[in-house]
Image: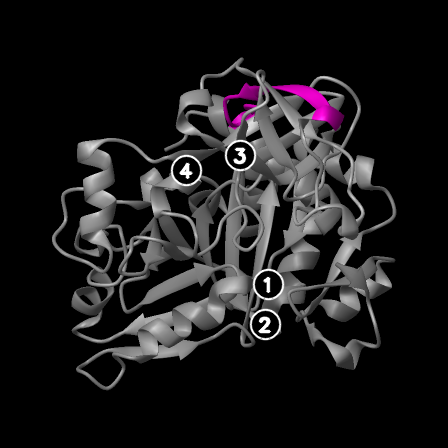
Amino acid sequence: MSEVAPKSAFRTLPLDDVHRRSGAEMSEHDGWALPEDYGDVAAEYAAVRSGAGLIDLSARGRIVVGGSEAVMFLNGLITNDIKTLAQNSWMPAAFPNVQGRLLAAVRVINRGDDFLIDTESATLQTVLKLLERFAHAGDFRVAEVTNETAMLSVQGKEAETVVRATLGDPAAEVGRQKAVAAKLSNDSGVTVIRATHTAEDGFDLFVDASAAQLLWDGLLKAGATPVGSRALEILRVEAGIPRYGIDMDETNVVTEANLDDAVSFTKGCYVGQEIIARIKYRGHVAKKLTGLVLERESTPERGAKIFSSDDKEIGRVTSAVFSLSLKRTVALGFVKYDYLMPGTQVKVAAVRQRPAQAKSPLTNASSSVPAHVAELPFLRGSWYSNSNG
């Protein structure tokens, strides 16, 4: 993250001017100028935990694929079984390499006439290149639509109420793993899926960029509160949701990153399938992403080492935040399999070394903070208590 330079230096969201007029502090993430906050991070966080927050996720990448051979080509590239994906449904999936390691995590939405693929901005170009390799191999069409579309997310206990007031009953009542088509007052189409980024109930809304402000204004009028990336980061970590390039990357086997629901173990062959299946049926991953609760005030840096109670190095921290609900620091990190039991006592390195002191940028167990392994998510919000879906 860095302070935002003049607008022209970075890619801008369709609602960039709207965010700036709303007083958002902007900063750069993955080449995009994004709203960090709208003046009160705690209030934005509280809006999601007790009401409805509105988050602009348009910097995520969006690709439309179609053609009579789309299912065949996609099924050979991703971990989930696209053949089972009914119209007006969506599924999580991953693109692995031949070693079963993670290249991208995606969501695939079957809209009937085509498939909409949503992925993080950090993995957009990777996914696009993987798909475009097959664009001339048959009836398989690929088009990036990130710039032409926007993605807004309503998250919180009252998200359903806000979506109902803005887009009507069918959109508000969409089930989990389902998608519906709604319309705005100007007849612009909105693809709606039910999904969480925060452990609260939530809806992701895909719309043409030209209609993004109409949708944004309608959601605000219905009671949603704008939420920036600072509050979202706290909510994300509390929900135990990993980000590519931060909590997971191409060094991780897909199932190390808690993406088991993105993998079909019954479908046919796909890139990396042999490795992923062998790990499941012949043993287990060597390490896995898990939660850590620090037992005194300290926020470890990304990459901080994790040690067992007897000072063996057993993992590393990937993300850490101060939880506004738990009033303590929580972290995500990879931990060796034998130490994954919730409640296991560990230590987290807390002090940065000077570069000349060692090859490792972070200290050993002698300057560490006690912590314990915790099951994810740290908070089980309305996503877990609501019966929809």
Give the Cα distance between marks 2 and 4.
32 Å
First of labels 2, 4 by sequence position: 2
Mark 4 lies on residue? 258
Residue of label 1: 58
Q: Percent from the top left, x then y, of residue 43?
A: 81, 36
Mark toward the start of the polypeptide (1 vs 2): 1
Q: Which callout, 1 or 4, points to the residue nearer the camera?
A: 4
Going by the numbered disc 2, the residue's amino acid type is: Ala
Segment colored magenta = 366-382
Q: Earlier in the sequence, mark 2 or mark 3?
A: 2
**Circle nearer the viewer, 1 or 3:** 3
Where, quadrant-wise, is the C terminus in this rendering?
top left
- Please tell me whether residue 377 belongs to the stretch shown in magenta: yes
Between marks 3 and 4, how big is the CA–CA gap? 16 Å
Going from N to C along the chain, the mark reached first, 1 or 4, is 1
- The disc placed on residue 209 is 2
